[in-house]
Amino acid sequence: MNNFETIQKKAINEWQSLQENPEPVIYIGMGSCGIASGADRIWKQVHETISKEKIKAKVLKVGCIGPCYLEPLLDIQKPGFPRFSFNNVDEQKTIRLLTEFLNGEESKLKPLGHLDSQRKEIDGIKSFWDQPMLKNQERIVLRNCGIIDPENINHYIARDGFKGLLKALNIGPEGIIDEIKKSGLRGRGGAGFPTGLKWQFCREAKGKLKYLICNADEGDPGAFMNRSLMEGDPFALLEGMVIAAYAIGANTGYIYIRAEYPLAIERLKIAITQMNDLGFLGKNILNSGFSFEIRLKEGAGAFVCGEETALIASIEGQRGMPRSRPPFPATSGLNGNPTNINNVETLATVPNILREGGNWYAGFGTKTSKGTKTFALVGKVRRAGLIEVPMGTTLRKIIFDIGGGPIKPFKAVQTGGPSGGCLSEEFLDLPVDYESLTQAGSIMGSGGLIVMDEHTCMVDVAKYFLKFTSQESCGKCVPCRIGTTRILEILEKITQGKGEIKDLEILENLAHTVKNGSLCGLGQTAPNPVLTTIKYFKEEYLEHIENNRCPAAVCRDLVEYRVIKEKCTGCQRCVNVCPTGAITGPRSEPHNLDLSKCIKCRACYEICRFDAIAGDAIVIE
């Protein structure tokens, strides 16, 4: 029995003993989303309760399983049963779970579902995977997230971890690259360049010293795919990095990760230590003669450092600014040496491809966009969270079947983060792949999907993202530095009721100039929100310009709020959320709104269930 088989046998025994544990096993979702929802308090309450009640149980941390709207999530695995999942747990529910559910009183606290893939229904309790948000997914890169303890390498090994690395070491660098080419894997960071071809360029580049860099500088507002993956399954990323490094001939790797991800950083450090201890990292990996070390580089959060050459400059200790290309990083990157850069999802997908085969992975997705893609589904959608679907899945299926759709009528979805485009209802049946999104004027990006409803002002959305990109511009090239600022100024002018019809033509001309003249991807894609909102929501721009009216009642300079007495039920929800006391009135009677106190925060407008708050246009002289 070789060293890997010995390690694997030990890991499988530990995993099986966990499943067959004679005492209850309690799993708590301790990703950032879970902790933000109170999972840290649940963790504390569980330990206090089992100590007080003298309950013998094992308590484990897991990452985010995906449906963030259900957090905090707590699973209980009783002896002889699968893992039962409980959602939106608080301290009181935790106490009841540990005292009543563990004592066999299941009827009092019925689980959301169970995590047994073999049995779809157990005693009337459906599988957790049959939940609306999960049943339409295809989990490949996320297969371990929420299932394993991300700080225990044996859990990862027991679920076929490092089998991809073992195969990679057997077939050699050329065999690895051929397998990645067969898979059709393209860069999941947004550009969509074929991964196998990128690796080949770097391998064939002249130079004895080569580097591998993982881009974990996830900077899109509302995006959390890479963070959740690193928090929930750091070993997948690290295994993918070892395979990629072996393929291109690199002995040193960097994970460039933003400092705002402390939990991901902590779990990566733990995983790196454990992999070094077992011989999956460091010198002479699995007695193959190949050595590889991984270093963490914490970034300061500059959005432009998501661009490859700016990222390299930051690692070198310089200001994060893009460089002209060519030369490309594959031939002259970090310290002038050949360098390959992939993002977190790309590298974490690699072990699955090597383990199951390139042809297997190519069986998912479309002809030109193979495999699956993770998305952060957020905004005005009922079921927000982290999802993974085959490429080519339509926006309609993602937003409505998986996400449950918005409560109010759907208006738009933005794909690709701040540099993406805003697509209208006519694109709901658009397949989500690289080519289709580009043709519609948007991009895949790293995987952010922001859903908007009728209460969203598209001019305001364009202004919000242009403010972000103009602030994040490094200022190196004139089109981006000056162009995004001028675009933002015009958008602000329109949302203040001072716009003119000629501004629309100026906006489009400026947008195309910035798009065509900028040095890097930040400037080249920054105008997308403006161009798509003008193209698909031009009537909203015209309402702002011609009628000084914001149809969604968002732009503060164009709206004032009032209570519609006939619709107001006096429920006092608006009274409770108003920060200035502008709304008053006794319960069950129509309320009053004092305009002199109103700061136009929209809190009352958004919380009212009876459409009793109106946003009226202000006449601008």
Image (tube, rainbow, N blue to C red):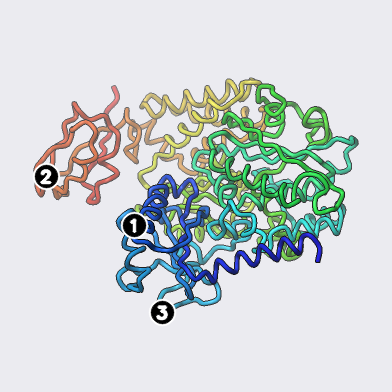
Say which label, 3 or 1, has the lower sequence index.
1
Secondary structure at badge 2 equals: loop
Residue named by callout 1: 52
Quarter placement of the C terminus: top left
Residue named by callout 3: 123
Secondary structure at badge 1 equals: helix
Residue 601 sits in quarter? top left
Is label 3 or label 1 in front? 1
Q: Nearer the viewer, residue 573 or 277?
A: 277
Quarter placement of the N terminus: bottom right
Q: Where 533 sits versus 148, above or below?
A: above
Question: What's under tag 3, amino acid-wise?
Answer: Asp
State the separation of the CA atoms marked 2 and 3: 49 Å
Residue named by callout 2: 590
Which percent across, then down, holds residue 260? 53, 35
Residue 141 sits in quarter? bottom right
